[in-house]
Image (cartoon, helix red, strand yellow):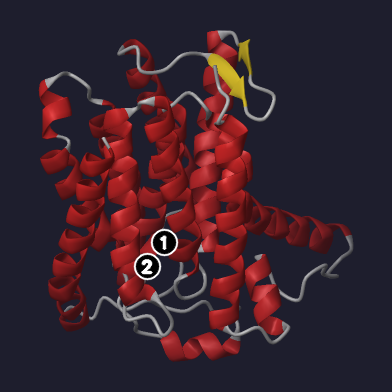
Amino acid sequence: MIIQLTIAFLVSLAATVVVGLVLVPALRRMKAGQTIREDGPVWHKSKQGTPTLGGIMFIAGVAIACLIVGFREIGQGALEHVFILIFSIVFASIGFLDDLAKLKKRQNLGLRAKHKFLLQLVVAVGFLLLMWFTDSLTTSLYIPFVNTTVPVAAPVYFIFAAFVVVGTVNSVNITDGVDGLATGVSIPVAVCLTFIAVLWGYESIGVFAASLAGGLVAFLCFNFHPAKVFMGDTGSLFLGGAICATAFAMDMPLVLLPLGIVYFIETLSDIIQVSYFKLTNGKRVFKMAPIHHHFEMCGWSEYKLFAVFTAVSAVFAAVSYYGVYYRD
C-alpha cells in the first residue's frame, strides 16, 4: 500500500507540473488575471493581473493519479476515491463559475453568496447520500482522542454533515488570501489524511489523499510568493471539498476540527470582525480580517505568514493523527 500511495503522490506531482507549464502561459495569453479587492492591503495591488484558475493544475494532477494508480481499486469495486474526486470536481465547478463571473465583471465579485451557498448545500447533500446508499458512510459519529463512537439519527447526522461540508469548504476559500497560504496549510492536512488512510486500511481513499498531497506540493512551486498563478475559487473549493469528503469517507468528520484549525481560525476571525463591527457601529477587533491580513498589517511578510501558518497546520496534523490512532 505504501508503494502504491508513493506512486500516486509522484504521478500527481509530475502531472500537475506538466499541466502547469502549459496552463500558466495560456492563462496569461487569455488575460485571465485576478482582480484584487479594493478593501484589501494596498500592497496587494501589485498582484493585479496575476493569472487565476490555477487550481485546474492540481485538479488535473489528482484526477490523473486517481484514475491511473487507483485503477485496480476501481476494478474491484472500491470506488470511494472516485466518489471523492467527483464530489470535489463538482465543488470546483461552482468555484469555476464564480471565477468566470469575476473575470467577466473585472472585479472581485462573482456569484451571489446565497446562490453559492445553495449550490454547495445541494452538492454536499448529494455526496453524503451517495456515500450512504453505497455503504461507504455510516451515521455514527466517531469522537477523536476519546476513542468513542456515538450513534446519531440519520436526519440529524445529514443536517450536521451538510453544514460541516459547506462550512469547511468556505473556510478553505477564506484562507486563500496570501501567496501560497492555502496551499502550504493544506499540504500537512493531505499528508495526515494519507497516513490515517494507511493506518486504518482505507486503500482507495489513501490513493486520493496521496494524490492531493502530490498535486499541492507541485502547485506550491507556482503559487509560492511571489505567486505566478493563483488557485482561484476553482482550486480552493475543490480543495475544501476534497478534504471534507476524505474525512467523511473515513467516518471521522470531527477530526476536521483540529486538522483544519487554521481554516477555522481564519473563518472565526472574519465572523468576530463583522459581528463586532455591527454591534459597535464601526469598531474593529482586528486591523483587517481574516486574520492573515491582520498579521500583514502588523508587519508580517508573506514568507513569515506562510511559514508560521504552515507550521501550525503541521503541528495540528500530527495532533490529529494521534487523536485517531487508537480508533477501534
Q: Residue at 63% across / 43% down in the picture?
A: 258
Contact, mark 2 vs mark 1 (Cβ under 8 Å): yes
**Of 4 and 114, the residue lying toward us:** 4
Estimate how packed mark 2 is, as few (under 14), some (14 to 19) or many (20 or more) residues with alpha carbons within 10 Å.
some
Q: Residue at x 59, y 75 (%)?
A: 305
Question: Which SS class for mark 2?
Answer: helix
Q: Is residue 268 left or right of residue 187?
A: right
Q: Residues within 10 Å of mark 1 (few under 14, many from 20)?
A: many
Say the numbered circle drawn on residue 135. none
Answer above or below: position of 68 versus 98.
Answer: above
Residue at label 1?
110
Residue on which disc 2 sits = 102
Q: Residue at x 17, y 80 (%)?
A: 25
- Residue 300 appears at what percent x and percent y? 65, 83
Q: How many marks?
A: 2
Q: Position of residue 67 (x, y in %)?
A: 14, 40
Residue 60, position in %: x, y? 19, 54
Residue farthest along the right direction in this orientation: 280
- Residue 287 visible? The answer is yes
